[in-house]
Amino acid sequence: MKLLKLLSVVGARPNFMKIAPLIRAFRKYPQVNHFLVHTGQHYDSNMSDVFFRELDIPCPEINLEVKSGSHAIQTARIMEGLEPILLHEKPDLVIVVGDVNSTMAAAIVAKKLCIPVAHVEAGLRSFDSRMPEEINRKLTDAISDFLFTPSPDADENLLKEGVNKKNIFQVGNCMIDTLFFELKKLEKKKQPIDFSEPLSLEGRGQGEGDPHRYAVLTLHRPSNVDNPKVFKNLLETFGKISKKIPIQFPIHPRTMERMKHFGLSTAKDITLLDPLSYVDFLKLYKNAAFVITDSGGIQEETTVLQIPCITLRENTERPITVTHGTNHLVGINQKKILKTVDTILKNKTRKTTKICHWDGKTAERIAKILVEKLGGSKRGERE
Ligand code: UD1
């Protein structure tokens, strides 16, 4: 049996829930020696450590502690820190997940050292190159050897960009593996998935006895929080929504920083919370009437749990959540947002179609493919 050394790189909050099921899946293969590097792109305890503890991710072998900086600085620090590690560890493969700066930086370093790269969550495109994540996605996919995609649209995008069909594997969604896994754990503990009591939320705008008496909000995209006019207009919109239904707002550190910097504030029926752990956030949004967000992953999680999601973006790299799911892509127009809220509050029964391979077994599929392919093919070679 050929021994395989697989090195994964994570850095920011949305990476952690994608790597957790993969590490679990690799444990089933005695020939796999897995090595984890944390770039330290996210470093606050509630943006990083808590996810490692809760999702049972082993302590990273190395933390590069790059922390925050401009895109160029952050990317350069990751590249500089990772190169000597890869030279020393000589892994058979580097695995990157998602679309953050750590993803792209790690892929470039590995590929330039002729180490094959696997990209988990490949092929997603918003077709909006003003989004730093879109640049990260395109560059990572352009040099990856294994492109693990979550949905047919992702395959189509990659094929159009000239990626060899043999390198594309539609395996589903690792983030949904974590969602199902953690939901099961909660059910086993018989922990009621209901945040409405502890948060003592008062019902508004909904029928009496309805458990869905609050909305959840997340916001962190530079396009929404870096421009004071846009941010102010959004906060005003949230204020209007909070008069219909109270809002719980776990606030990202960058959003909090921008809000203070611009001298802005939230309405009184919006409860600001520190960033929540994975499980606490799951408990919170699981019972929400709807979620308002500009996140990528939340569009997918709400689709699977059939919770209406209002996405404050003009485009999405996850169109399947609109065509098959609960996602309303509304942008930042106040009228449009308020109209969508009213529609959701009136009509709570929207059902979603099951999405192929979003079944909790994606990581197992990825592990199987990697072990089979790397066991047989020559190092650094594309199929
Ligand atoms: C990053 C990802 C984004 C992802 C998001 C999830 C990129 C380009 N962006 O955005 O795709 O959706 O993570 O959270 O990779 N900060 C802290 N503590 C932390 C981390 C960040 O206070 O632990 C603050 C700092 O002020 C920092 C700012 O957040 O400057 C931005 O952090 P950064 O990692 O650059 O990007 P995010 O906005 O978190």
Image: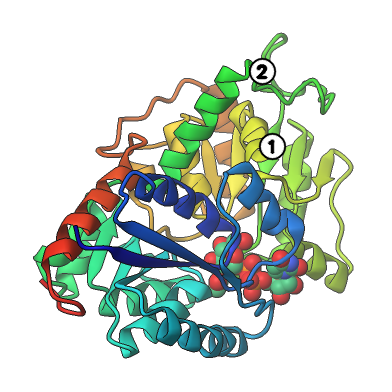
Residue designated by label 1? 280
Q: Quadrant of ligand 1?
A: bottom right
State how many labels appear. Answer: 2
Asked whether the viewer can see residue 328, the reply is: no
Please give the name of the residue rendered at 50% of the width and 70% of the height, measured from the top-left corner: 100
> Which of these two is toward me, 144 or 52?
52
- Sequence order check, earlier mark of 2 and 1: 2
Q: Please state if 234 lies on the left or on the right of 141 as rendered.
A: right
Q: Secondary structure at mark 1?
A: helix
Please give the name of the residue rendered at 30% of the width and 46% of the height, measured from the top-left corner: 172
Q: Is mark 2 within 8 Å of ligand 1?
A: no
Image: 343 above or below 109:
above
Q: Position of residue 59 (x, y in %)?
A: 60, 58
Residue at far top of view = 209
Q: Please state if 258 lies on the left or on the right of 150 as rendered.
A: right
Quadrant in the rendering for residue 108: bottom left
The quadrant of the picture occupied by the C terminus is: bottom left
Using the image, tell me which numbered label, if any, was put on residue 192. 2
Q: Position of residue 198 (x, y in %)?
A: 82, 25
Please give the name of the residue rendered at 89% of the width and 42% of the height, measured from the top-left corner: 268
Using the image, tell me which numbered label, if any, was put on residue 68. none
Q: Secondary structure at mark 2?
A: loop
Quadrant in the rendering for residue 281: top right
Mark 2 touches mark 1? (CB < 8 Å): no
Please give the name of the residue rendered at 38% of the width and 60% of the height, measured from the top-left corner: 33
Count residues near mark 2 (Cα–Cα under 10 Å), then give few for <14, some for 14-19, many for 20+. few
The quadrant of the picture occupied by the N terminus is: bottom left
Name the kind of residue labelled 2 in the image. Pro
Q: How is the image coloured?
A: rainbow
Q: Please state if 361 lies on the left or on the right of 284 as rendered.
A: left
Asked whether the viewer can see residue 319, the reply is: yes
